[in-house]
Protein backbone atom coordinates (compact mmCIF):
# COMPACT_ATOMS: atom_id res chain seq x y z
CA UNK A 1 0.00 0.00 0.00
CA UNK A 2 1.46 3.35 -1.01
CA UNK A 3 1.47 6.35 1.29
CA UNK A 4 -0.98 8.12 -1.06
CA UNK A 5 -3.59 5.46 -0.37
CA UNK A 6 -3.17 5.52 3.41
CA UNK A 7 -5.74 7.88 4.83
CA UNK A 8 -6.73 8.94 8.31
CA UNK A 9 -10.38 9.88 8.68
CA UNK A 10 -12.07 11.44 11.69
CA UNK A 11 -15.73 10.44 11.55
CA UNK A 12 -18.99 10.31 13.43
CA UNK A 13 -21.42 7.82 12.01
CA UNK A 14 -21.24 8.05 8.24
CA UNK A 15 -19.98 11.62 8.15
CA UNK A 16 -16.32 12.42 7.53
CA UNK A 17 -15.11 15.50 9.40
CA UNK A 18 -11.58 15.52 8.08
CA UNK A 19 -9.48 13.28 5.90
CA UNK A 20 -5.69 13.36 5.94
CA UNK A 21 -3.02 11.34 4.25
CA UNK A 22 -1.09 9.38 6.84
CA UNK A 23 2.22 11.21 6.25
CA UNK A 24 0.54 14.63 6.61
CA UNK A 25 -1.20 13.58 9.82
CA UNK A 26 2.02 12.21 11.26
CA UNK A 27 3.95 15.36 10.35
CA UNK A 28 1.31 17.43 12.14
CA UNK A 29 1.72 15.28 15.23
CA UNK A 30 5.49 15.63 15.08
CA UNK A 31 5.23 19.42 14.90
CA UNK A 32 2.65 19.79 17.65
CA UNK A 33 2.85 16.43 19.36
CA UNK A 34 1.56 17.19 22.83
CA UNK A 35 -1.28 19.55 21.87
CA UNK A 36 -2.28 17.38 18.92
CA UNK A 37 -2.51 14.29 21.07
CA UNK A 38 -4.60 16.17 23.64
CA UNK A 39 -6.98 17.25 20.88
CA UNK A 40 -7.03 13.76 19.44
CA UNK A 41 -7.91 12.27 22.83
CA UNK A 42 -10.70 14.83 23.29
CA UNK A 43 -12.03 14.03 19.84
CA UNK A 44 -12.10 10.28 20.53
CA UNK A 45 -13.85 10.69 23.87
CA UNK A 46 -16.53 12.89 22.27
CA UNK A 47 -17.58 9.89 20.24
CA UNK A 48 -15.54 10.48 17.12
CA UNK A 49 -13.76 7.62 15.43
CA UNK A 50 -10.27 7.73 14.04
CA UNK A 51 -10.16 5.46 11.04
CA UNK A 52 -6.98 4.49 9.24
CA UNK A 53 -6.83 2.92 5.82
CA UNK A 54 -3.90 0.72 6.76
CA UNK A 55 -3.41 -0.65 10.26
CA UNK A 56 0.24 0.33 10.38
CA UNK A 57 -0.69 3.97 9.93
CA UNK A 58 -3.33 3.83 12.66
CA UNK A 59 -0.87 2.17 15.02
CA UNK A 60 1.69 4.91 14.40
CA UNK A 61 -0.83 7.67 15.03
CA UNK A 62 -2.41 6.19 18.13
CA UNK A 63 0.79 4.72 19.51
CA UNK A 64 -1.15 1.60 20.47
CA UNK A 65 -3.00 -0.71 18.11
CA UNK A 66 -6.33 -0.78 19.94
CA UNK A 67 -8.34 -1.39 16.80
CA UNK A 68 -8.07 -0.64 13.15
CA UNK A 69 -10.87 -0.22 10.64
CA UNK A 70 -10.09 -0.53 6.96
CA UNK A 71 -11.98 2.22 5.17
CA UNK A 72 -12.28 1.70 1.42
CA UNK A 73 -11.49 4.79 -0.59
CA UNK A 74 -14.26 5.91 -2.91
CA UNK A 75 -13.27 6.05 -6.55
CA UNK A 76 -14.58 9.04 -8.46
CA UNK A 77 -16.79 8.11 -11.41
CA UNK A 78 -17.12 10.81 -14.05
CA UNK A 79 -18.70 8.67 -16.75
CA UNK A 80 -20.42 11.02 -19.18
CA UNK A 81 -18.32 13.97 -18.05
CA UNK A 82 -14.83 12.80 -19.06
CA UNK A 83 -14.13 11.97 -22.69
CA UNK A 84 -11.36 10.06 -24.43
CA UNK A 85 -9.27 13.21 -24.92
CA UNK A 86 -9.07 13.84 -21.16
CA UNK A 87 -11.51 16.77 -21.21
CA UNK A 88 -14.05 16.94 -18.37
CA UNK A 89 -17.23 18.81 -19.21
CA UNK A 90 -19.26 21.15 -17.05
CA UNK A 91 -22.40 19.05 -17.53
CA UNK A 92 -22.90 15.39 -18.30
CA UNK A 93 -22.47 14.83 -22.06
CA UNK A 94 -22.09 18.58 -22.30
CA UNK A 95 -20.47 20.68 -24.99
CA UNK A 96 -18.59 23.06 -22.67
CA UNK A 97 -15.44 22.66 -20.61
CA UNK A 98 -14.99 25.26 -17.90
CA UNK A 99 -11.66 24.53 -16.19
CA UNK A 100 -12.73 26.38 -13.04
CA UNK A 101 -15.59 23.97 -12.32
CA UNK A 102 -13.59 20.86 -13.22
CA UNK A 103 -10.66 21.95 -11.06
CA UNK A 104 -13.02 22.82 -8.21
CA UNK A 105 -14.69 19.41 -8.48
CA UNK A 106 -11.39 17.52 -8.51
CA UNK A 107 -10.02 19.63 -5.64
CA UNK A 108 -13.11 18.90 -3.56
CA UNK A 109 -12.93 15.17 -4.33
CA UNK A 110 -9.22 15.01 -3.51
CA UNK A 111 -9.65 17.06 -0.33
CA UNK A 112 -12.35 14.68 0.90
CA UNK A 113 -10.19 11.62 0.24
CA UNK A 114 -11.62 10.33 -3.04
CA UNK A 115 -9.45 8.50 -5.54
CA UNK A 116 -9.30 10.73 -8.64
CA UNK A 117 -6.36 8.93 -10.28
CA UNK A 118 -8.41 7.67 -13.24
CA UNK A 119 -8.97 11.24 -14.40
CA UNK A 120 -6.06 13.23 -12.98
CA UNK A 121 -3.35 12.63 -15.58
CA UNK A 122 -5.61 12.72 -18.69
CA UNK A 123 -7.15 15.97 -17.45
CA UNK A 124 -3.73 17.41 -16.63
CA UNK A 125 -2.47 16.59 -20.13
CA UNK A 126 -5.57 18.07 -21.74
CA UNK A 127 -5.32 21.23 -19.66
CA UNK A 128 -1.59 21.58 -20.21
CA UNK A 129 -2.08 21.50 -23.97
CA UNK A 130 -4.75 24.20 -23.85
CA UNK A 131 -2.83 26.35 -21.36
CA UNK A 132 0.31 26.19 -23.48
CA UNK A 133 -1.46 26.80 -26.79
CA UNK A 134 -3.53 29.80 -25.65
CA UNK A 135 -1.14 31.27 -23.10
CA UNK A 136 -3.79 31.35 -20.38
CA UNK A 137 -6.79 29.46 -19.08
CA UNK A 138 -10.10 29.75 -20.86
CA UNK A 139 -13.38 28.01 -21.58
CA UNK A 140 -13.79 25.51 -24.39
CA UNK A 141 -16.66 24.53 -26.66
CA UNK A 142 -17.09 21.40 -28.74
CA UNK A 143 -17.16 22.41 -32.41
CA UNK A 144 -17.48 19.71 -35.08
CA UNK A 145 -16.32 17.09 -32.60
CA UNK A 146 -13.21 19.01 -31.48
CA UNK A 147 -12.56 21.24 -28.47
CA UNK A 148 -11.89 24.89 -29.27
CA UNK A 149 -11.16 27.84 -27.03
CA UNK A 150 -14.35 29.92 -27.14
CA UNK A 151 -14.62 32.14 -24.05
CA UNK A 152 -12.50 34.07 -21.60
CA UNK A 153 -12.19 32.42 -18.18
CA UNK A 154 -14.96 33.32 -15.77
CA UNK A 155 -12.64 33.42 -12.76
CA UNK A 156 -9.00 33.61 -13.80
CA UNK A 157 -7.71 34.08 -10.25
CA UNK A 158 -9.43 31.11 -8.63
CA UNK A 159 -8.87 28.91 -11.70
CA UNK A 160 -5.13 29.54 -11.60
CA UNK A 161 -4.96 28.80 -7.88
CA UNK A 162 -6.88 25.54 -8.29
CA UNK A 163 -4.72 24.62 -11.29
CA UNK A 164 -1.60 25.13 -9.21
CA UNK A 165 -2.99 22.98 -6.41
CA UNK A 166 -4.03 20.28 -8.85
CA UNK A 167 -0.54 20.15 -10.38
CA UNK A 168 1.09 19.94 -6.95
CA UNK A 169 -1.17 17.00 -6.03
CA UNK A 170 -0.17 14.90 -9.04
CA UNK A 171 1.86 11.77 -8.26
CA UNK A 172 5.59 12.18 -8.80
CA UNK A 173 5.60 9.65 -11.65
CA UNK A 174 3.27 11.90 -13.68
CA UNK A 175 5.06 15.18 -13.12
CA UNK A 176 8.14 14.47 -15.24
CA UNK A 177 6.38 13.66 -18.50
CA UNK A 178 4.00 16.55 -17.97
CA UNK A 179 6.80 19.02 -17.11
CA UNK A 180 4.72 20.29 -14.24
CA UNK A 181 7.49 22.55 -12.89
CA UNK A 182 7.25 24.71 -16.01
CA UNK A 183 3.47 24.76 -15.89
CA UNK A 184 3.51 25.67 -12.20
CA UNK A 185 6.03 28.47 -12.77
CA UNK A 186 3.84 29.98 -15.47
CA UNK A 187 0.64 29.65 -13.47
CA UNK A 188 2.28 31.09 -10.37
CA UNK A 189 3.52 34.06 -12.39
CA UNK A 190 0.09 34.59 -13.93
CA UNK A 191 -1.58 34.43 -10.52
CA UNK A 192 0.94 36.76 -8.88
CA UNK A 193 0.24 39.35 -11.56
CA UNK A 194 -3.37 39.44 -10.40
CA UNK A 195 -2.51 40.37 -6.82
CA UNK A 196 -3.42 43.92 -5.95
CA UNK A 197 -0.49 45.32 -3.94
CA UNK A 198 -2.69 47.99 -2.35
CA UNK A 199 -5.37 45.65 -1.01
CA UNK A 200 -3.46 42.38 -0.70
CA UNK A 201 -6.24 40.41 -2.46
CA UNK A 202 -6.44 39.10 -6.01
CA UNK A 203 -8.24 40.66 -8.96
CA UNK A 204 -10.60 38.55 -11.07
CA UNK A 205 -8.40 38.77 -14.16
CA UNK A 206 -5.91 40.99 -15.92
CA UNK A 207 -8.84 42.81 -17.56
CA UNK A 208 -10.99 43.25 -14.44
CA UNK A 209 -9.80 45.36 -11.54
CA UNK A 210 -12.35 44.12 -8.99
CA UNK A 211 -11.78 41.35 -6.48
CA UNK A 212 -14.29 38.69 -5.46
CA UNK A 213 -14.72 37.27 -1.97
CA UNK A 214 -15.34 33.67 -3.02
CA UNK A 215 -12.43 33.65 -5.49
CA UNK A 216 -10.03 34.88 -2.83
CA UNK A 217 -11.28 32.25 -0.40
CA UNK A 218 -10.43 29.55 -2.92
CA UNK A 219 -6.99 31.07 -3.44
CA UNK A 220 -6.48 31.10 0.33
CA UNK A 221 -7.65 27.46 0.52
CA UNK A 222 -4.89 26.40 -1.87
CA UNK A 223 -2.31 28.87 -0.47
CA UNK A 224 -3.29 29.40 3.19
CA UNK A 225 -1.12 32.39 4.05
CA UNK A 226 -1.93 34.49 7.10
CA UNK A 227 -1.40 37.74 5.19
CA UNK A 228 -4.01 36.77 2.62
CA UNK A 229 -6.44 35.72 5.36
CA UNK A 230 -6.08 39.14 7.00
CA UNK A 231 -6.46 40.93 3.66
CA UNK A 232 -9.66 39.02 2.92
CA UNK A 233 -11.14 40.10 6.25
CA UNK A 234 -10.02 43.68 5.79
CA UNK A 235 -11.49 43.99 2.30
CA UNK A 236 -14.69 41.99 2.57
CA UNK A 237 -15.95 41.83 6.16
CA UNK A 238 -18.54 44.49 6.96
CA UNK A 239 -18.73 44.95 10.75
CA UNK A 240 -21.83 47.16 10.47
CA UNK A 241 -24.02 44.67 8.61
CA UNK A 242 -22.09 41.71 10.04
CA UNK A 243 -21.67 39.98 6.70
CA UNK A 244 -19.09 39.57 3.99
CA UNK A 245 -19.18 41.77 0.93
CA UNK A 246 -19.09 39.67 -2.23
CA UNK A 247 -16.97 42.06 -4.29
CA UNK A 248 -14.88 45.19 -4.11
CA UNK A 249 -16.90 46.58 -7.02
CA UNK A 250 -18.21 49.93 -5.81
CA UNK A 251 -21.45 49.93 -7.83
CA UNK A 252 -22.50 46.42 -6.77
CA UNK A 253 -25.80 46.67 -4.90
CA UNK A 254 -25.12 46.11 -1.22
CA UNK A 255 -26.42 44.66 0.93
CA UNK A 256 -28.32 42.58 -1.62
CA UNK A 257 -30.54 39.58 -1.02
CA UNK A 258 -30.03 37.35 -4.07
CA UNK A 259 -29.14 33.79 -3.24
CA UNK A 260 -26.14 33.99 -5.57
CA UNK A 261 -23.80 35.60 -5.00
CA UNK A 262 -24.93 37.26 -1.80
CA UNK A 263 -26.26 34.42 0.37
CA UNK A 264 -24.02 31.71 -1.10
CA UNK A 265 -20.92 33.76 -0.40
CA UNK A 266 -21.69 33.96 3.33
CA UNK A 267 -21.32 30.20 3.83
CA UNK A 268 -18.33 29.76 1.53
CA UNK A 269 -15.74 30.40 4.28
CA UNK A 270 -16.89 27.20 6.00
CA UNK A 271 -16.40 25.13 2.85
CA UNK A 272 -12.72 26.06 2.58
CA UNK A 273 -11.99 26.22 6.32
CA UNK A 274 -11.32 29.96 6.41
CA UNK A 275 -10.57 30.81 10.06
CA UNK A 276 -11.59 34.47 10.31
CA UNK A 277 -15.34 34.00 10.67
CA UNK A 278 -16.65 36.33 13.38
CA UNK A 279 -18.58 34.40 15.99
CA UNK A 280 -17.06 31.08 14.94
CA UNK A 281 -17.98 28.55 12.30
CA UNK A 282 -20.71 26.80 14.26
CA UNK A 283 -22.67 29.95 15.07
CA UNK A 284 -22.15 31.28 11.55
CA UNK A 285 -23.49 28.03 10.08
CA UNK A 286 -26.59 27.95 12.27
CA UNK A 287 -27.46 31.53 11.41
CA UNK A 288 -27.02 30.86 7.70
CA UNK A 289 -29.18 27.73 7.76
CA UNK A 290 -31.92 29.52 9.72
CA UNK A 291 -31.98 32.36 7.20
CA UNK A 292 -31.28 30.71 3.86
CA UNK A 293 -31.94 26.96 3.96
CA UNK A 294 -35.53 27.15 2.71
CA UNK A 295 -34.55 29.31 -0.28
CA UNK A 296 -31.56 27.12 -1.11
CA UNK A 297 -33.54 23.88 -1.10
CA UNK A 298 -36.68 25.24 -2.76
CA UNK A 299 -34.87 26.58 -5.83
CA UNK A 300 -33.43 23.16 -6.73
CA UNK A 301 -34.55 22.14 -10.20
CA UNK A 302 -34.88 25.75 -11.36
CA UNK A 303 -31.40 26.93 -10.36
CA UNK A 304 -28.04 25.38 -9.62
CA UNK A 305 -28.38 23.02 -6.62
CA UNK A 306 -25.25 24.30 -4.86
CA UNK A 307 -24.12 20.90 -3.68
CA UNK A 308 -21.08 22.39 -1.96
CA UNK A 309 -23.42 23.74 0.71
CA UNK A 310 -24.50 20.17 1.42
CA UNK A 311 -20.82 19.40 2.00
CA UNK A 312 -20.70 22.20 4.58
CA UNK A 313 -23.80 20.74 6.26
CA UNK A 314 -22.11 17.32 6.28
CA UNK A 315 -18.99 18.79 7.87
CA UNK A 316 -21.12 20.53 10.49
CA UNK A 317 -22.90 17.33 11.47
CA UNK A 318 -26.25 18.52 10.10
CA UNK A 319 -27.38 15.19 8.67
CA UNK A 320 -30.99 16.29 8.26
CA UNK A 321 -30.03 19.17 5.97
CA UNK A 322 -27.79 16.83 3.96
CA UNK A 323 -30.67 14.41 3.48
CA UNK A 324 -33.07 17.23 2.64
CA UNK A 325 -30.69 18.40 -0.08
CA UNK A 326 -30.34 14.87 -1.44
CA UNK A 327 -34.10 14.42 -1.50
CA UNK A 328 -34.57 17.73 -3.34
CA UNK A 329 -31.59 17.57 -5.69
CA UNK A 330 -30.98 13.96 -6.68
CA UNK A 331 -34.15 13.71 -8.84
CA UNK A 332 -32.52 16.41 -11.01
CA UNK A 333 -29.16 14.66 -11.24
CA UNK A 334 -27.53 15.23 -14.66
CA UNK A 335 -30.17 17.82 -15.60
CA UNK A 336 -29.32 21.23 -17.06
CA UNK A 337 -28.31 22.88 -13.77
CA UNK A 338 -26.35 19.87 -12.45
CA UNK A 339 -22.60 20.54 -12.68
CA UNK A 340 -19.57 18.30 -12.35
CA UNK A 341 -19.05 19.73 -8.85
CA UNK A 342 -22.55 18.61 -7.84
CA UNK A 343 -21.74 15.16 -9.22
CA UNK A 344 -18.69 14.94 -6.95
CA UNK A 345 -20.85 16.01 -3.99
CA UNK A 346 -23.46 13.35 -4.79
CA UNK A 347 -20.76 10.67 -4.78
CA UNK A 348 -19.11 11.96 -1.59
CA UNK A 349 -22.22 12.00 0.57
CA UNK A 350 -23.60 8.86 2.23
CA UNK A 351 -26.45 7.27 0.24
CA UNK A 352 -29.95 8.59 0.88
CA UNK A 353 -31.90 5.75 2.49
CA UNK A 354 -35.33 5.43 4.09
CA UNK A 355 -36.92 6.70 6.17
CA UNK A 356 -36.79 9.87 4.05
CA UNK A 357 -37.09 13.36 5.57
CA UNK A 358 -40.55 14.87 5.99
CA UNK A 359 -41.10 17.93 3.83
CA UNK A 360 -41.92 20.05 6.88
CA UNK A 361 -38.48 19.22 8.30
CA UNK A 362 -36.82 20.56 5.15
CA UNK A 363 -38.30 24.06 5.17
Image (cartoon, grey):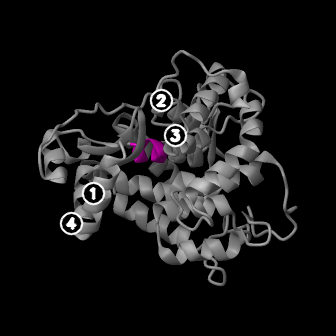
**Disc 3/disc 1 C-alpha distance (Å):** 23 Å
Residue position for label 2:
347
The image quadrant that residue 179 belongs to is bottom left
Nearer-the-camera pick, 283 or 141: 283
Horizontal side, residue 174 vs residue 2: left or right: right
Question: Percent position (x, y) of residue 300?
Answer: 73, 30
**Disc 2/disc 3 C-alpha distance (Å):** 13 Å
**Quadrant (top left, top right, bottom left, bottom right) of the N terminus:** top left
Total marks in image? 4
10 Å neighbourhood of mark 1: few (<14), some, or many (≥20)?
A: few
- Residue at x 22%, y 34% (from the top left corner): 69
Q: Is residue 151 visible?
A: no
Residue position for label 3:
314
Residue position for label 4:
30
**Disc 3/disc 4 C-alpha distance (Å):** 29 Å
First reached walking from the N terminus: tag 2 or tag 4: 4
First reached walking from the N terminus: tag 1 or tag 2: 1
- Residue at x 23%, y 43% (from the top left corner): 6
Nearer-the-camera pick, 274 or 125: 274
Question: Percent position (x, y) of residue 94?
Answer: 62, 29
Nearer-the-camera pick, 84 or 28: 28
Q: Does residue 195 lie above or below 148 as drawn?
A: below
Q: Does residue 29 lie above or below 354 as drawn?
A: below
- Which structural element holds mark 1? helix
First reached walking from the N terminus: tag 3 or tag 1: 1
First reached walking from the N terminus: tag 2 or tag 3: 3
Magenta stretch bounds: 106-112
Is residue 110 rendered magenta in the image?
yes
Mark 2 and mark 4 in contact? Answer it, CB < 8 Å: no
**Disc 1/disc 2 C-alpha distance (Å):** 24 Å
Amino acid sequence: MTSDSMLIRIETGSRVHQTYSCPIFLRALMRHRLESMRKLIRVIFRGYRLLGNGCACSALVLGVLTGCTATPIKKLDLSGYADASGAITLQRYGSTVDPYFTLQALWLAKKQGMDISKYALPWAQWMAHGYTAMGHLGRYCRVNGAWQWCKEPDADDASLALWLQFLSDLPAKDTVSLQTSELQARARQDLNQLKNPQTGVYRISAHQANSLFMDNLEIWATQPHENLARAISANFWDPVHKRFRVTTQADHAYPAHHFYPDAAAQIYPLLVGYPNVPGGARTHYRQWIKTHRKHWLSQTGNEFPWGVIAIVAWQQGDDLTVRCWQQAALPFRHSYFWTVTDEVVAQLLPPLTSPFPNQKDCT
